[in-house]
Amino acid sequence: MIKNVLVALDTSEIASRVVQTLDELILAPDSTVVLCHVFPTADSEIELPADRPHPESTTVSYFQIEKQLQAYQENLSVKTELELVTGDPAQEIIRLANIYQTDLIIIGSRGLTGMKRIVLGSVSNQVVEEANCSVLVVKPN
């Protein structure tokens, strides 16, 4: 039985589909859902090569993300918690999943292919490979 779910959300348009997928799951009334967002560290941004595209703009503020997560939280019928952390996205998602002993991680995939996937990497792939629990990857469209 799925009792604890970690939902990893970013600022992309896939986030609302991830929440919609969560809402379509039948969870026990005593389930806990952790909505999380990972802000990349300043160090990880400095290490990005200047001649390659950068993953996401960090101009989105902590307050804006927190407000968005709270909006998602209000529409869920189970107990929820919010986690806003800083670090490497895949590593932090896995760390939070271990802390909360989650049975399932739900994460979006931006559907990158080819060179974009190589250059930008895939957080969802890394989470699938390294997580100790099942991972549901929500794809765009």
Image (cartoon, rainbow, N blue to C red):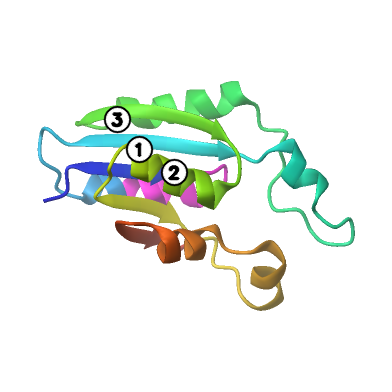
Res. 95 mark: 2
Q: Which residue is mark 3?
A: 75
- Whether residue 129 appears in this view of the structure is yes
Label 3 vs label 2, nearer the camera = 2
Q: Which residue is mark 1?
A: 99
- 136 left or right of 15 in image: left
Q: For marks 1 and 3, give the CA distance.
A: 25 Å
Q: Is residue 117 above or below residue 16?
A: below
x, y percent for residue 19: 36, 44
Which residues fall within the magenta stretch? 9-20
**Residue kind at label 3, given as amino acid type:** Asn
Q: Say which residue appears at 60% left-offset and 25% top-offset.
A: 62
Question: Residue 53: within the magenta?
Answer: no
Q: Along the line of sight, which residue is nearer the eye, 84 or 95?
A: 95
- 51 left or right of 22 in image: right
Question: Residue 15: within the magenta?
Answer: yes
**Residue kind at label 1, given as amino acid type:** Ile
Q: Is residue 64 above or below residue 107?
A: above
Q: How many marks?
A: 3
